[in-house]
Image: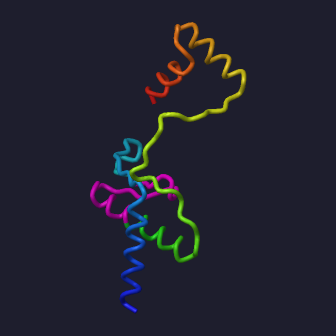
Amino acid sequence: MKKTTSTSQRAVKEAAARYLKIVEWSDADRCFVGRCPGLFFGGCHGAEETEVYRELCGLVEAHVAELLAGGERLPGATAGKSYSGKFVVRVDPGIHQKVALRAAAQNLSLNQFVADALAKV
């Protein structure tokens, strides 16, 4: 019976490791905030960065364990994910026209205009 428990814990740890965990300072909250986008909303916070990370890892493992125990499918992994650099954005035709005209006014392609704007985010 012990072996099954440790195997289950190992499966949870391996599954939890597939999710990006972010700990960053929040000026608004005046503390470190930990979150795991793509797995759950919310997270944890505290004064010590390493403690917040440790707590976040525990939350991720607990959430993954709960999902697996309930027979639910885990969301797609977020750690180590690569991006193609391409995505499609659907906007109102009026917005499309407005942005295209601004790009043309700056002698830029629509793609370059949008890429420049996104780089400033």
Which residue sits furthest front?
A: 84
Q: Is residue 9 within the magenta segment? A: no
Position of the C terminus, as image quadrant, is top left
Residue nearest the observer in this picture, 17 or 82: 82
Above or below: residue 28 compared with residue 98: below
Name the side, left or right, on which 66 lies relative to 90: left
Corner quadrant of residue 101: top right
Q: Residue at x 66, y 22 (%)?
A: 96
Residue nearest the observer in this picture, 121 or 100: 100
Residue 24: give x, y in percent of width and height.
Answer: 35, 47
Above or below: residue 44 compared with residue 111: below
Residue 91: give x, y in percent of width and height.
Answer: 67, 29
Figure disc tally: 0
Q: Residue at x 38, y 69 (%)?
A: 13
Above or below: residue 19 compared with residue 95: below
Q: Residue at x 58, y 74 (%)?
A: 71
Q: Which range is magenta?
A: 34-57
